[in-house]
Amino acid sequence: MFSQFKQLIDAAEAKVIGFDELQVSLQASQKEVTRLEQLVQTQQKQLESCSAQDQLISQLTRRLAAQSQALEQLEASTQRREKQFEAAQNQATFLQQEVGQKRKRIQDLESDGTFKIHKIQQLQHKLQEYRGICSYVSLHTQQLEQQLQEQQGEQESQQATEPQKLKQQAVGHRCSTSATNQSNTSADLPDQDNSVAEGAAGLLAMTSTADRTQATQSGADAQHSAHDPGSYPEATPSQAGTAARGSASQEPRAESAPKRASCVITGRHPNTPRQVAVVCRQLTGTLVLGDCCQQLKILHNGSEMAPPDFEAAAGCSKGKNWKANIKVQGSNGRNQMLKLWLPGVMQLMGDHSKTAVVKHTDINELLDPETGLRHLQDE
């Protein structure tokens, strides 16, 4: 019994010890459950924070998308503005070039205007001198006409009275020599002829003196009209008659021949160079190619002259062949006649070239940009 009781006590004690262990394990399990609950709460908080972060990330993503679209629009607008800026720069460059061309044109017009003002002043001075000469000529012409009228009146009176005097002398002489011989009578007849000859010579001398005076005056008028053609006033009938009588006794003067009209530009290519280097024999100059209705001029040693004058200054005969004698100087050392260089590029008054100005063709198709000479078909 005692052994059984002891076994029961030992079993009870073992159960008590096991219960204590179970209680300890239970407490440990409760702590673990508490810890796990805390972890769950922590994870829930983390999940909540993660959802908030997801929302924030989605918001940021939308904002980034909006910003990317704004950036794309900004880039597109920037590209448009760059293109507009480039177009504005090109337009500004073109306007600057146009302004430079207009300034050069204004300078050319100013220089041309200064030259024309100087020419007008010279013409006014010549006109004043011409008026003085005309007044002097008209005054002396009137005096000469009065003298001629007086001389003609005297000549007419002498012609009217001289036959009567001659008859009276002849009658008296015949009466006084009626008693003389035939030899004395024949000797007196030559004396009568000599007196008549002397009277006629006097009349001829007076007439020739008047004619020489008229011829001298008409020669001065012709010489003045040759120096200033086109500006002579209308002559009076007396002056016209005097000039007609005087011109019959003189040879025609070379100066009275009409001058050739200046070479006027009637058409030009818009891109034709303004100045071209030219040469005639050993004489060099610069051909000035202006606009329409302007004269074709050549600059030589600071002075302007017409192409025929430049041709004459070079020693060539001044005529209609200046387009062949004057040549364009190329940068490659070759020269080209103006009559080959001008057609299609420039049209002149009186130019019988059948080729008109080719305005709608590039200038480089007509002129070589390197040498400045004309493209020819055989080349």
Image (cartoon, rainbow, N blue to C red):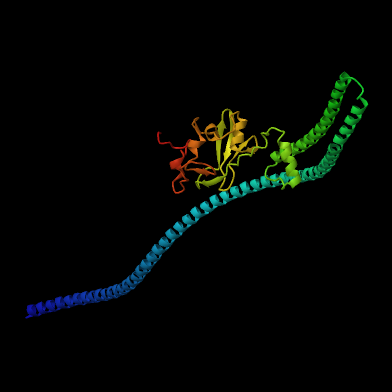
| Residue 330 visible within the image | no
Q: Nearer the viewer, residue 23 or 94?
A: 94
Measured as percent of width and height from the top left, residue 61 is found at 35, 68
The residue at 57%/38% (across/down) is: 287
Task: Say which quarter of the image contains residue 166.
Answer: top right
- Image-based side of 371 in relation to 207, left or right: left
| Figure check: 309 above or below 32 | above
- Residue 364 lies, with reference to residue 44, above or below; the image says above
Q: Quarter-wise, where is residue 78 in the image? A: bottom left
Q: Is residue 226 visible?
A: yes
Q: Dividing the picture into quarters, in which one does residue 213 lie?
A: top right
Task: Locate residue 225 relative to residue 269 in the image: left or right.
Answer: right
Q: Nearer the viewer, residue 256 or 314?
A: 256
Q: Residue placed at 87% from the left, 18% from the top?
A: 183
Q: Position of residue 276 (x, y in %)?
A: 55, 38
Residue 9 pos. (x, y %)? 13, 79
Q: Residue furthest top?
A: 183
Q: Nearer the viewer, residue 19 or 306?
A: 306
In the image: residue 114, left or right of residue 190: left
The quarter of the picture where the C terminus appears is top left
Query: In this view of the protein, which residue sits in the foreground, 63 or 131?
Result: 131
The residue furthest front is 179
Vertical arrangement, residue 116 with respect to residue 334, above or below: below
